[in-house]
Image: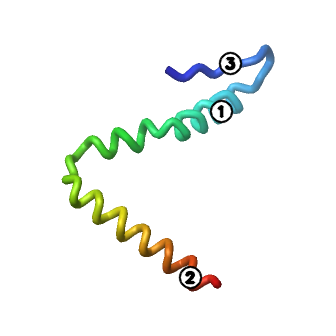
Amino acid sequence: MLKIPVKEGENIERAIKKFKKKFERTGTLKELRERQKYTKPSVRKRQTKIKAVYKNSLQVNSI
């Protein structure tokens, strides 16, 4: 449960912005999207390897 303390006289838009930022950091929405469909562990592992190779190639090319 997210709690955003709102001070007396604080702008409501600022409080909404704080809430959105905090909600994004928790990763709740990302988790919900991942749970919509089942991915096999082997597929998940393959995707992480592909992502790691891509990131590594970006790092090597920038040098």
58 shown above or below 4: below
Residue at screen point 55% across, 39% down: 25
* Residue ID for mark 3: 5
| Amino acid type, mark 3 | Pro
- Residue occupying the point 49% across, 80% down: 57
At 77% from the left and 22% from the top, the residue drawn is 10
Looking at the rendered image, the disc whose residue lies closer to the viewer, 2 or 1, is 2
Amino acid found under the numbered disc labelled 1 = Lys
Q: Which mark is residue 53?
A: none
Tag 1 residue = 18
Lower position in the chain sequence, tag 3 or tag 1: 3
Q: Amino acid at mark 2?
A: Val
Q: Position of residue 39 (x, y in %)?
A: 22, 52
- Residue 5, percent from left and from top: 68, 18
Give residue 12's quadrant in the image.
top right
Marks 3 & 1, CB-CB < 8 Å contact: no
Which residue carries the number 2 mark? Answer: 60
Is residue 5 or residue 17 the one in the foreground?
Answer: 5
Q: Quadrant of the C terminus?
A: bottom right
Q: Is residue 8 left or right of residue 44?
A: right
Q: CA distance from mark 2 to mark 3?
A: 45 Å
